[in-house]
Amino acid sequence: MNAREMQDMITKVCSIEYENYHDYLEKYSDKPEHVMLKILGNYFEGIGILVAKKLVEVDIVHDFWGDIVQSSWEHIKPLIAEMGKETAQPNMFMFWEYLYDEMRKREQRQ
């Protein structure tokens, strides 16, 4: 994945408009945005794991990504919760959420 592909995914995922999970599925389940959401989730999940294992400092992630981790999580969190229920994976993207929480804590310390 290159930087342009990643930026395109972030832009598309953050522009998804939905009222609830069923509305999202009707609009996007067979569209590229659905795949992009999963790819983006896996990407930030991986970064979250690195931060949780203390292999990467949250400051480095913030310096690289700024508030994108947080704004994208806030936008799709309701979808992730419902996807987790539907697929019997209640901890879906839990390290992305962990990363989000760590980024928020970092902001509070600043």
Image (spheres, rainbow, N blue to C red):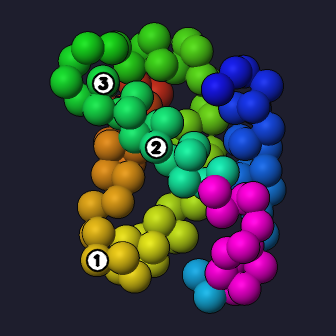
SS type, badge 3:
helix
**First in residue order: circle 3 vs circle 1:** 3
Dot 1 corresponds to which residue?
Answer: 88
Task: Check the image and report above or below for 79 versus 94.
Answer: below
State the residue in front, 93 or 73: 93
Residue drawn at 67 percent across, 75 percent down: 29
Expressed as whole percent of the image width and height from the top left, the position of residue 36 reads: 66, 51
**First in residue order: circle 1 vs circle 2:** 2
Task: Check the image and report above or below for 18 versus 45.
Answer: below
Dot 2 corresponds to which residue?
Answer: 42
Residue drawn at 45 percent across, 77 percent down: 82
- 73 within the magenta span: no
Q: Type of residue at label 1?
A: Ala
SS type, badge 1:
loop
Q: Type of residue at label 3?
A: Val
- 30 within the magenta span: yes
Crowding around mark 3 (Cα neighbors within 10 Å: few <14, some 14 to 19, many 20+) is many
Residue drawn at 30 percent across, 24 percent down: 50
The quadrant where residue 33 appears: bottom right
Q: Type of residue at label 2?
A: Asn
The magenta segment: 23-35
Indicate the quadrant containing the N terminus: top left, top right, bottom left or bottom right. top right
Label pair 2/3, CB-CB below 8 angstroms: no
Q: Nearer the viewer, mark 3 or mark 1?
A: 1
Q: Nearer the viewer, mark 2 or mark 3?
A: 2
State the residue in front, 68 or 93: 93
Crowding around mark 2 (Cα neighbors within 10 Å: few <14, some 14 to 19, many 20+) is some
